[in-house]
Image: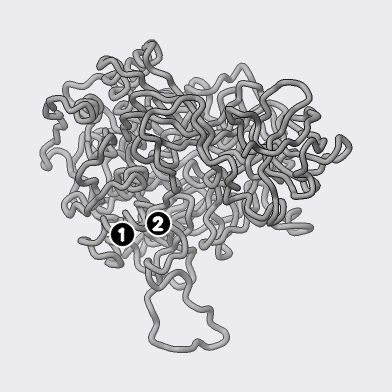
Amino acid sequence: MKPQINRLPESAPKGFGGTAIDRSRPVTFRLDGRLVTGFEGDTVLSAALASGIDTLGSHLNSPVGLTSRAYPAISHASLRHDPQFALPMARTPAQDGADFVCLGAERSRGIARLFQAGRTLGLKLYAAQPMPYPWRATPGLAGSSSELLVIGGGVAGLSAALAGARAGLTVTLIEARAFLGGNSGLFGTQEGEDAPEESMTRLAAEVEAADAITILKSTEVFSVGPGMVRAHQIDASSGNSRGHVIDMAASHIVIATGSLERLPLFPGNRLPGVIGTLDAYELATRYGVWPGQHAVAATSSNFAYRLAMLASDAGVRVDRILDSRSETASRFIAFSRAYGIVQSPGTTVAAAVVARAGGTLSVHLEGRSEMPLVTDRLLVSGGWQPDLTLWHIAGGTSAWHAERRRIEAQGSLDSIALAGSAAGYLTRRGCIQSGADAIDQLLGRQRRPVDDPSVDRLHETPDGPLAIAPLAGEAAPAYLDAGTSLIQRPSPTRKRVSLAFWRSPPRGLPLLSEAPQPLAVNEVAAGVDLSLVPAEAAGIVAQERVASVPLAAAPSEPRSEAWEPVPLDEVPPYLAGRYGDDAKIVRIVPDEPRVLEAGALIYPDSDTKHPIHAIGVVLRYATSGTVGLVVAQAGSSRHPVTVRERGQIIRAQIEALDP
């Protein structure tokens, strides 16, 4: 059994003992065959990190860290061959006795796997094929409808949900994680505000007590359009996690997805042990996870100083804070001096290197001749970018804000509004008030100014420019973002046509525009800082290249439970050719009345059980019965089949669809 070597003690102060876990209820599960231990309330990801698994795999012969923003899809081992049962590692509950496997990437095989360090998942990663989440190609099943749908359960989303309920609307609040409140605790308290934990607890309690508000946790929205959203939901009510893609209709939508932390650009910025301050804060406060005994911070933002103080209170030694800004002022900076933390203004990271096999990092400094810093963990913060992913998918526009050095939303959309950090607000007070303002905007009511106070620059230095280190020939890659894609900092074009045979060709894209996959908002922002994207074109590039998932137009009226997400006779694109080019859409009629679960495999008889021998799959439940896709030979009327659902054998017959 693997010990939880990266778990802080339950008594750790400042909430670093983990508020989401129940240490009296241990769990043990398998991940790719290895035993992992955790606690009730852990996700598969947090339990793996607590147990010392911190490496996703390798890309360009360099290890890539496993983090809350970069993780693989997983599945129960018995369902690994069916992409419909893929689950997100960061949202799937750790369940006692479960047997999970990683999906979607090639892994080392044979003897090579025997020599891998225990800290890696061993995935082989390719930039042109970002970590796939198969459910994004799955049509949505009909979900519930409401008058207002709020995306994001931070303080802005909670405020918007409450304002909507007070306005007499039926509200659905969707949060990707298993808890409400967000991460306002990292950003501290301004004059006149209560403690962030008090705000989050109070707002969450009010939302949970409101009869007009339905809360969907562990549910991530990945596509949005006027009147409808598509989301992937984890259902663990049966004790066995299952994922479902659902479409939900709403007359009004609020996007309150917060901000993304940007990644400083230096070689080795995604090595195991390198992590954003927000990710590190969430892992510690929610799950009590903190690898190593000492850390170094590299930042252009003030909030890294607050995390350093909180970590110090929890017994972690923060050796040094490297600040790329030459002159800084902040209440956090002043307080951190009292902790004895060494501060190095005007200092940036030149490169991070794996110091030795045990996992420590060697941090080299730009323009400094001193010895590299050796640390267990490198906390990085390159400033904050509003998360406009869903805003762009919905058709919203944006533009580069030169003073704040980020992409910000512009204009408005019918029936869709932004709130909180996603709307550009900087303070907790502004985020909370913006939730109510978004409701006023959607309902056409008179709007009141949002109080988003900013501290004078003399007392609170704003975020500095993104720290960018020079390219280094043989160092580890430098990536533009810490998310699911692996887009490197583009290499400069070389004038020489050919290279000597003993030299490696330059790595990375010569132009950001040549990236074969969609771009994240942070990657577009990094392109502006690198002069690869003209500032005046940043909004257009973001609108065109941000990862999007097509969403069919919503019905003109809010749909009922009888609404069909796709035509009955349409083969989903992700299943095209899987059961032959002449596969048929049919009705599946169980011998005993029951609803068959979408994704359940169809077999010719009860003796056949290997997924490769399946002759069809259940697509959806419609008002006229269960609809499935089967091979042409089984498409004849009254053909007997067997459906395997959650280990059960269900006898059924095939009927032709009504014309």
Instruction: Report the Cα–Cα distance between label 2 and label 1.
Output: 9 Å
79 left or right, relative to 42: right
Find the residue positioned furthest to the right: 607
270 left or right, relative to 126: left
Where residue 247 appears, as percent x and y from the top left, is 47, 34
Q: Which mark is residue 541?
A: 1
Q: Are marks 2 and 1 in contact (CB under 8 Å)?
A: yes
Viewer can see residue 338: yes
For the residue pair 332 and 519, the one nearer the viewer reads as 519
Quadrant where the image shows the C terminus:
top right
Quadrant where the image shows the N terminus:
top right
Query: Which residue type does callout 1 highlight?
Result: Val
Q: Would you call the spot at circle 2 few (<14 residues within 10 Å), some (14-19), or many (20 or more)? A: many
Residue at the image position 16 percent from the left and 32 percent from the top: 452
Where residue 157 appears, as percent x and y from the top left, is 32, 27
Residue identifier under label 2: 519
Residue at the image position 40 percent from the left and 44 percent from the top: 276
Viewer can see residue 314: no
Query: Which residue type does callout 2 highlight?
Result: Leu
The quarter holding residue 332 reads top left
